[in-house]
Amino acid sequence: MSVHEFKPDLPPPSSSLGVVGWLKTNLFNGPVNSIATLVLLYILVPPLWSAFQWIFLNADWVGDSREMCTSGGACWVFINDRFGQFIYGYYPVELRWRVDAFFISLAVIIGLLVYEKTPQRAKLGIFSLTIYPIIVFFLLNGGVLGMEPVETHRWGGLMLTLVIAIVGIVAALPFGIVLALGRRSEMPIIRSFCTIFIEFWRAVPLITVLFMASVMLPLFVSEEIEFNKLLRAMIGIILFQSAYMAEVIRGGLQAIPKGQYEAGEALGLSYWQSMGLIILPQALKITIPSIVNTFIALFKDTSLVLIIGLFDLLAVGQAALADPAWLGYSVEMYVFVAFVFWLFCFGMSRYSIYLEKKLHTGH
Amino acid sequence: MAASPSQKDNSAFSLRKVWFDPNVRALVFQLLTVAAVVAFFYYIVSNALFNLDKRGITTGFAFLEQTAGFGIIQSLIDYDESKSFGVAFLVGLFNTVLVSFIGIILATIIGFIMGVARLSSNWLISKLATVYIETFRNIPLLLQIFFWYIVVLTPLPGPRQSLSLFEMFFLNNRGLYVPKPVFEDGFGLVIAAFVAAIVICIVVARWARNRQETTGQQFHTVSFSAATLVVLPLLAYFVAGSPVSWEMPALKGFNFRGGVTVYPEFIALLIALSIYTGAFIAEIVRSGILAVSKGQTEASVSLGLSKTQMLKLVIIPQAMRVIIPPLTSQYLNLTKNSSLATAIGYPDLVSVFMGTTLNITGQAIEIVAITMAVYLTISITTSVLMNIYNRKMALVER
């Protein structure tokens, strides 16, 4: 009795495999797509190639003056020459180690927070939101422990951008929580105050808030209190940001099932206990991706402080353009600054998408 | 949850009971809040009055009547230096509305094209859309405005070496010059014809809907309306003897005369706003389309709908329900972001009013209040309309 033997499977047709198969399914599936691909390639390749040449192949990288930029490509010498200012602003050169310490500690803390196996991650998170900003302020500002004071008008560049964005988000978080709870409160007066506050700041552009902070704040307090420019900008940004933060947190609070609130009441917990122990830990956890998204928006918006005369990364770049020794290299400056902003924002947006996927444990 | 009389213990009125009564507590907390808010406002208002008095700044809105004394490059209404600050305010407001309105249209077009392109089966097209979205929404808008203004528009050649298209459009470092339509006597007829066309379209659409509901017969409402809207005004135009002539821009001396000048500040702001907001709209469109479940597509295929019918009757109506609320908030964002005009000197509301007028008059409180009130009005109106729309479009579930 012969056993029927199956013939071995034929390999798939060579046109659906490998590079050819990929090209066929993704670029040339059907006549319309094929024509579209070819036309796009024809339009795109030459400018992309010349941009590539300009940025990399023909660029000048090292040197100390514009005479070194001879090859016709990008003059990165300009960025190189100004690099210190882009990063530290007008911070005294001999004290730049303090800014470096800030950068390094920030990188370490963020790294530890992002890495999921870090022991005591929650405690570290609380530390980085409460004590750490204070340490950083004294580190950068000086004036204690025999450190030479550096006034805030000398802060600038990437460091100032980071400081404003981080202070904005860290300080807006508690305000945002209070406002979000207030807006969901059952007490009508508190609810309407919180709603008005939130909707007011969300309705006006950040520029008007910054203008308001810089021209009106000094009028609102008694004369003895002096606000420097940075502090005024920060107050404006915090007010503005806490309204956005409140809406994000409200979204998280609404996503918590009603049973959780009822469970808190059934256990006999007071309002603050049930919020602090049951609702907020869950709500904040699911809002982290949205908080990262508002942080991205804030990070981009910090560039607006140049309008009220602070020197963030973009403003330092604008100032560098006016340097007679380096006239005519505006493209290099914008490309570099845009790249730095892009790197931060894109990285954070990837992280927020990753978190969203991880939290999305449903079907 | 007030303590009922039956639960009262022997001491008929104990302070302890009152203290733990939620209603009493709520009242106390709210009164405290009101007191704190009132005290806060009292503090800042009294300080402000004292400080204003000390610096000799006048208060009140009388300054709106005073002569402004500064020029504005672009104005939709009649304006010169002899007009008042109130007129300057209107000029700024109209400029804000103009750039926001055109920006919203452009951003919507860009956003819808890119959002659909990102879902294309062609790898190159979808990757291009992705690169566009991820690049432009991760770079600050202010930087993009500067880029278009300083890197792209400022180095354009001077008026004598203008780039020209058909000798009608000229682009140079002073702006874009386009022919200006001059309306002559008979133009009213064209407008009347256009209004009539709109009325006819509404009537026909209503009739077609009724007929479809009663008899099931369909009518090509869209093609009919499009044809009416084009043909009727066109007919009127020729009947009235072509009542529009064009004033061409022409080089006279060192600059162009005639035509309409679109200033580089406006162009830069418009390009940056549309491209930046377009990237956000593209993401909204994409997620809206993806939100329509696959079962809907399959259902319409099994009903035998054609591809166009499927898109028109099944996919787009459902996708729009998801798309429109975030889309409106992007429109609001664009309007608010148009205030970045200040940075390059496009005379929008913030630049003219919070910038120049504030510097001249020094009346910070009034000016900030007026400007913020304008944005508040725009935003509240939009959100009221949005709520009405949402209520109308909300899924009716059984």
Image: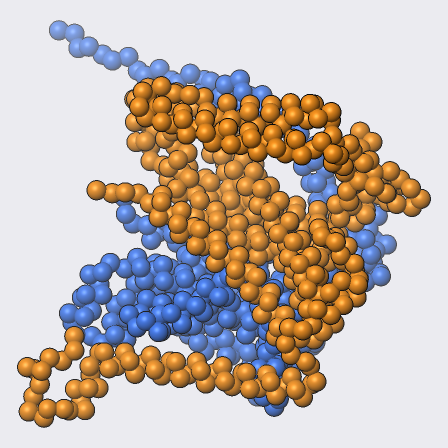
Q: Is residue B293 visible?
A: yes
User: Looking at this view, is B311 or B212 the one in front?
Assistant: B212
Which residue is pictured at 16% across the width and 86% down the height? Answer: B17
Which residue is pictured at 48% across the width and 55% down the height? Answer: B381
Q: Residue B389 at what x, y percent from top left?
A: 40, 47
Q: Is residue A213 left or right of residue B1?
A: right
User: Looking at this view, is B150 or A7 the one in front?
Assistant: B150
Indicate the colour of chain B.
orange
Which residue is pictured at 37% across the width and 40% down the height? Answer: B291
Using the image, determine if residue A44 lies above or below residue A108: above
Using the image, determine if residue B192 lies above or below residue B224: below
From the image, which quarter does the C terminus of chain A lie in?
top left
Quadrant hosting residue B209: top left
From the image, which quarter does the N terminus of chain A lie in?
top left
Quadrant hosting residue A268: bottom left
Q: Residue A183 at what x, y percent from top left?
A: 36, 67
Q: Residue B91 at what x, y percent from top left?
A: 69, 57
Indicate the colour of chain A.
blue
User: Looking at this view, is B297 or B305 the one in front?
Assistant: B305
